[in-house]
Image (cartoon, rainbow, N blue to C red):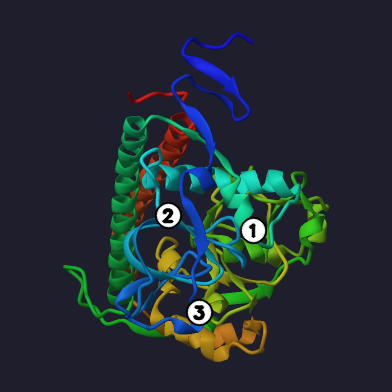
Amino acid sequence: MELKRGYKRTEMGVIPSEWNLDYVENLATVTTGGRNTQDRVVDGQYPFFVRSQTVERINSWSFDGEAVLTAGDGVGTGKVFHYINGKCDVHQRVYRISEFGTRLSGQFFYLYFETHFFNRIMQMTAKSSVDSVRREMIARMIIPLPPPSEQAAIAVALGDSDALIESLEHLLAKKRKLKQGAMQELLTGKKRLPGFDQEWKWRSLGELFDFSGGVSASREQLSSNGHCYLHYGDIHMSAKTYVDVMVEADAIPKLDIPLAMAPRTSLLADGDVVFVDASEDDEGTSKHVVIVNKERVPFISGLHTIVAKSKTEDLDHLYRRYCFQTTVVKRQFRFFAVGTKVSGVSKSNIARISMSVPSLPEQSAIAAVLSDMDAELAAVEAKLAKARLVKAGMMQELLTGRIRLV
C-alpha cells in the first residue's frame, strides 16, 4: 500500500516523517516510590499515589516536579495512571516516570501512555490479563516522538477536551444532587407545589398492590429468541427506575418458552412495579423498575423478582418511578432485609412497608417536575457521552499523527 506523502513506515506503524521513535528509558527516569499504604494520612498536605485510581493524602513528599504514575500490581495493573506537576509521595509498588528531557513532554507522555500502555503490555506478555508490571516493561516501551511544539499542541487540544468533560461531569453531579434533594422534599410533603394543600394519607404497599413471584430461569437460558424476560440482575444494573418495553424490546433478554408456561401473575402489564428479592448489599434491597407496556407485549418477570400489581388506582404510573426512592421507604426495605452475604426481602414484608401518599393530581404534578429533571439529566449525560467519544477519536488521530496540528 502506497504511503501518504509526509509519512513513513516504522515498527510502530505509519507515522509522520518528522516524528521519531525511542525507548522510554532514553527519554525519562523510571523508578518506584518508597511508601506503604499505611503511611497515608486523612486530609494530609500532599497527594499520595497508591495502587488505585484514588489519590490518597500524606504529610510527606519525596518528589517535586512533573511525573506520570502507574500501578505496578494490584487490581489497577496496567490501567491506573496519574499525572502531577508538584510535590507528592509515592507507594513502593507504584512506578514514577519523571525527569523528562527536552525531547519529551510529560503531558504528551501521559496521554500516550494512558492510551496505549495496557495493550502494549498485553502484547509483551501474550496474556489476557496482567498481574504485575516490571520496570523494564515501561523502560523498554517504544513511543513515537513528535517535535516538542507538536507535543505541546496535542496536549493543549486534548486538555481542552478534558476540561469540557470535567465541566459536564460536575454539572451532571450537581443536577443529580438537586434532583435527589427535590425528591426527598416533594415525595415526603416537606415541600408542597403551588395549589396543593390537601392532607396526605399513609398507605401500606399491601393496601396498594398484590404481590407475586416471577419465572425462574438462569442467565444461560436467555437468548435473543422468545419472550421478553426481566432478570433481577438487569434491575440491579440499571440506572433507570422503569423499563419501556417497546423502546427497549431489542435489548431485553428473551426466554424461549410457551407463554402458557408463565403464570399470568408473572406477565408484566403497564404500571406494574418489579422489586428484586435478593441483593448483595442493603442499598440494593429497594431496587425496582416500573413497567411501561401500553401495547401489552408479553413480558415475563424472572428469577428473584417480586411483581407488584395494582389493587387500586391510587398511584399515578409516572409517580411510581419516584415514590419508592425516598429515605423513608429505603429505610424500611433495609429494616426488613434478612441474610448475611445476601440480603433478601419477602413479599409479605414488602406489603408491610408504608408511605405517605398525596392526591392523584398532586402526584401527577410532582412526577412532572421530577420527570423534567430527568430529561435535563439525560441531556447532560448525552453531551458527556458525546464529549468522551470526541476525545477518544481525537486521541486516536492525534497520538498517531493521522491528524496534524502544526
In space, the residues marked 2 and 1 are separated at their CA atoms by: 17 Å
Task: Report the residue marked by disc 2.
Answer: 98
Q: In this picture, is 312 found above or below 128? A: below
Q: In this picture, is 184 found above or below 10? A: below
Task: Report the residue marked by disc 3.
Answer: 37
Q: Identify which residue is drawn at 70% across, 65% down.
A: 266
Mark 3 / mark 2, whichever is N-terminal: 3
SS at badge 3:
helix
Report the amino acid beneath label 3.
Thr
Q: In this picture, is 135 found above or below 37? A: above
Can you tell which mark lies on residue 134?
1
SS at badge 1:
loop
Q: In this picture, is 201 found above or below 383? A: below
Mark 2 / mark 1, whichever is N-terminal: 2
**Does the CB distance between marks 3 and 2 fall below 8 Å?**
no
Q: Identify which residue is drawn at 35% across, 84% down.
A: 201
